[in-house]
Amino acid sequence: MTDSSALDPEDRKIVTLARSARARNGVPEGAAVRDDTGRTYVAGTVDLDSLRLSALRTAVAMAVASGAKSLEAAAVVTESENVPEEDLAAVRDLGGAGTPVLVAGPDGSVRGTVTAG
């Protein structure tokens, strides 16, 4: 477990944004990514009959659609203990293998950090 208060303020910000997206939309996951210019993109799980995307893949897609060229970091708020490989692949595609992905529980406590690679 990582002490959330010890996080860099910018990393704490994306965890907070991810948590609020989850709560606001009543979805299983919330995610936020920060691009190489410091802009953030926030999303929740998409679960339609014709489209299903995790919150993290949705946040990456929003960044790409907005013109982001790279990612500095990502955060996902979830009850799951793991980040699916498909989610890590999306982060890796835009940010590279070393991009950190903060994994937090629904209360916002960061459980750990994994890299996209």
Image: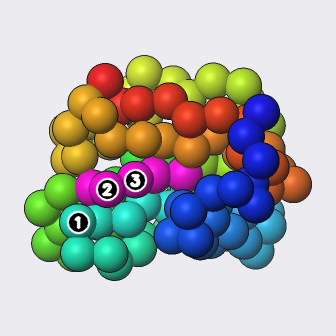
Q: Residue furthest front?
A: 6
Q: Earlier in the sequence, mark 2 or mark 1?
A: 1
Q: Residue at 31% of width from left, 56% of height from top? A: 72
Q: Name the residue carrying label 2.
A: 72
Q: Earlier in the sequence, mark 1 or mark 3?
A: 1
Q: Are marks 1 and 3 in contact (CB under 8 Å)?
A: no
Circle 3 residues within 10 Å: few <14, some 14–19, many ≥20: many
Magenta-drawn stretch contains 59: no
Task: Provide residue 8's location: percent of width, then percent of height.
Answer: 56, 62
Task: Provide residue 52's location: percent of width, then percent of height.
Answer: 49, 43
Disc number for residue 73: 3
Task: Provide residue 6's location: percent of width, then percent of height.
Answer: 70, 56
Task: Provide residue 76's location: percent of width, then percent of height.
Answer: 59, 48
Q: Residue at 42% of width from left, 41% of height from top? A: 100
Q: Are marks 2 and 3 in contact (CB under 8 Å)?
A: yes
Figure quadrant of the C terminus: top left
Q: Which residues are magenta?
A: 71-75
Q: CA distance from mark 2 to mark 1?
A: 5 Å
Work out whether 13 lies above or below 105: below
| Residue type, mark 2 in image | Glu
Q: CA distance from mark 2 to mark 3?
A: 4 Å
The kind of secondary structure element at disc 1 is loop
Residue 49 visible in the shown view = no
Q: Splitting the image into 4 quarters, where does residue 96 fall?
A: top left
The kind of secondary structure element at disc 3 is strand
Work out whether 81 lies above or below 42: above
Residue 57 visible in the shown view = yes
| Residue type, mark 3 in image | Ala
Q: Residue at 38% of width from left, 65% of height from top? A: 34
The kind of secondary structure element at disc 2 is strand
Disc number for residue 36: 1
Q: Nearer the viewer, residue 109 or 81?
A: 109
